[in-house]
Amino acid sequence: MKREAKIITHRKEKRIAVYFEKNPKFIARIKELEGSRWSPTLGVWHLPDTEENRIRFKLRPLSHSIASSEGLTQIKKIQTLLRLQTL
C-alpha cells in the first residue's frame, strides 16, 4: 500500500497529514496514535506535528527545519539589539 505524509496547516495548526488508500487495518493503527484526527474537509487523517511523528513518518525532524521569514526577521532584530548593547 502506498502511503505519503506531509506537513500541512489545518485550522491554523501545523499537523502531519497521512495519505493512504482506505484500509481498515491502517485506519485502526492511525486511530491508536495520540492526537490523530480525521478531517472530513480535507479527506485525510492528520496528527500533531511532533518530533516523534516526523520520525515515524520519515519526515525531516523539527530540529532540521529552517526558520520562517518572520523568524529570520526576529533573529536579525535580536542580533541588532545585541550589537548595540556592546557599543
Image (tube, rainbow, N blue to C red):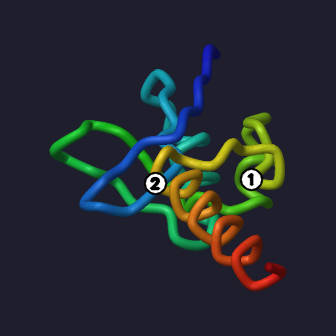
Q: Is 3 left, or right, of 24 in this rendering?
A: right
Q: Position of residue 48 (x, y in %)?
A: 54, 63
Tell me which residue sits at (74%, 53%) in the image. 62
For the residue pair 22 and 58, the one nearer the viewer reads as 58
Q: Which mark is residue 44?
A: none
Identity of the amino acid at label 1?
Leu
Note whether 79 is above or below 43 in the view shown. below
Outermost residue to the left: 41
Q: Position of residue 87 (x, y in %)?
A: 80, 79
Q: Position of residue 61 (x, y in %)?
A: 80, 47
Q: Which mark is residue 70?
A: 2
Identity of the amino acid at label 2?
Glu
Q: Is 45 left, or right, of 63 in this rendering?
A: left
Q: Which mark is residue 62?
A: 1
Sequence order check: which comes first, mark 1 or mark 2? Answer: 1
Quarter of the figure that contains the N terminus: top right
Q: What's the distance in space between the residues labelled 1 and 2, CA to CA?
A: 17 Å
Note whether 5 is above or below 79 in the view shown. above
For the residue pair 60 and 67, the one nearer the viewer reads as 67
For the residue pair 28 and 15, the one nearer the viewer reads as 15
* Residue 11 falls in image quadrant: bottom left
Note whether 2 is above or below 7 in the view shown. above
Q: Position of residue 49 (x, y in %)?
A: 59, 58
Outermost residue to the top: 2
Whether pointer 1 and pointer 2 mark residues with C-beta atoms closer than 8 Å, the reply is: no
Tell me which residue sits at (62%, 14%) in the image. 2
Tell me which residue sits at (64%, 52%) in the image. 29
Which element carries disc 2, helix, strand or loop? helix
Which element carries disc 1, helix, strand or loop? helix
Note whether 36 is above or below 4 in the view shown. below
